[in-house]
Image (tube, grey):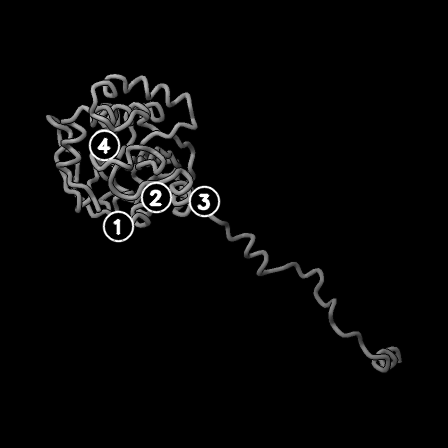
């Protein structure tokens, strides 16, 4: 079940905890994908808080928001790039997107397989996607006070297995949000320290799982080999034919 867009907006833009989460995830995304000119960048679910760094250089930025969640205009004070869509039918041409981000779109969907099929469809050759989901082993998935406390939390193996099933190759996996989901001033003030600390300890479970994956593109098969098999060489033709009988040979000699 999708969260309401107003609840998501209020968390990420109007609470200190939401701004801390937004900054930690967005900064890691920019480390993976520095803004580049001429790319089409799209987000599905409620990924728009992560897309602002790409507005200046990208050829196109698209914020896809599923119908059950609702839509809001974004970015504020600029030309709107967000659009309401069916979660299994995105209004994006096949192969258009270079970079795709899914946040609060996969774990809350009633049909995650169809969401992944759409994600695979819209990515172009060489395209990459980042999936941001609640980490089953983290604290954030256990608290209803944040958007990561809703939907199905994932382990790294579960998410990567699902991605492989739908034509993606997992490239990098990591966890984020190492401070607890607390509104205490201490944890909010020290959030940057905990993010740096957590990145140095790969065994430490963060509240959010982030997986980068590439689209598998199979080379087209050529018909020459198949045709050659259908038309085998005739060198061995007649090997299995019956030999002439002795009487037939005698008659031929006479």
Between the C-alphas of marks 3 and 1, the distance is: 29 Å
Q: In terms of depth relative to the viewer, which is nearer, 25 or 98?
A: 25
Give the spatial CA distance, label 4 vs label 3. Answer: 27 Å
Task: Mark 3 and mark 1 in contact? Answer it, CB < 8 Å.
Answer: no
Question: Mark 4 — residue?
Answer: 61
Q: Earlier in the sequence, mark 4 or mark 1?
A: 4
Q: Where is residue 112 in the image (x, y as percent from the top left)?
A: 30, 47
Task: State the separation of the CA atoms marked 2 and 1.
Answer: 18 Å
In the image, residue 120 sits, relative to residue 189, either above or below, namely: below
Q: Nearer the viewer, mark 4 or mark 1?
A: 1
**Whether residue 36 can be seen here:** no
Q: What element carries label 4?
A: strand
Q: Name the residue under label 1.
A: 110
Task: Choose the circle earlier in sequence order: 3 or 1.
Answer: 1
Q: Which of marks 2 and 4 is nearer the N terminus?
A: 4
The vertical placement of 213 against 165, above or below, is: above
Q: Nearer the viewer, residue 142 or 193?
A: 142
Q: Going 37% across and 34% down the picture, which residue do you hit?
A: 211
Read off the residue under disc 3. Answer: 218
73 vs 95, left or right, is left
Q: Which of marks 2 and 3 is nearer the N terminus?
A: 2
Residue 120: image tag: 2
Numbered mark located on residue 66 in the image: none
Q: Earlier in the sequence, mark 4 or mark 3?
A: 4
Q: How crowded is mark 2: few (under 14 residues within 10 Å), some or many (20 or more)?
A: many
Residue 178, how many percent across, how many down? Answer: 32, 26
**Residue ID at (21%, 32%):** 48
Q: Is mark 1 on a helix, strand or loop?
A: loop
């Amino acid at each position: 079940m999708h969260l309401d867009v107003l609840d998501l907006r209020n968390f990420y833009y109007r609470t200190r905890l939401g701004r801390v989460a937004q900054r930690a995830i967005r900064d890691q995304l920019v480390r993976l994908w520095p803004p580049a000119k001429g790319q089409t960048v799209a987000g599905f679910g409620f990924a728009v808080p992560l897309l602002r760094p790409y507005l200046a250089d990208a050829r196109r930025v698209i914020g896809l928001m599923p119908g059950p969640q609702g839509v809001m205009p974004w970015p504020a004070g600029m030309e709107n790039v967000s659009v309401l869509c069916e979660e299994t039918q995105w209004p994006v041409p096949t192969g258009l997107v270079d970079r795709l981000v899914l946040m609060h779109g996969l774990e809350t969907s009633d049909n995650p397989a169809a969401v992944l099929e759409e994600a695979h469809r819209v990515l172009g050759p060489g395209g990459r996607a980042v999936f941001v989901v609640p980490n089953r082993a983290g604290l954030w998935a256990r608290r209803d006070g944040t958007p990561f406390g809703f939907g199905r939390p994932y382990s790294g193996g579960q998410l990567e297995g699902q991605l492989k099933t739908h034509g993606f190759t997992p490239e990098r996996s990591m966890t984020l949000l190492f401070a607890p989901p607390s509104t205490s001033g201490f944890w909010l003030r020290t959030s940057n320290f905990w993010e740096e600390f957590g990145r140095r300890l790969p065994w430490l479970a963060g509240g959010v799982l982030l997986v980068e994956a590439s689209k598998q593109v199979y080379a087209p098969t050529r018909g020459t080999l198949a045709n050659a098999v259908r038309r085998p060489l005739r060198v061995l033709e007649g090997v299995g034919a019956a030999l002439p009988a002795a009487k037939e040979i005698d008659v031929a000699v006479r």
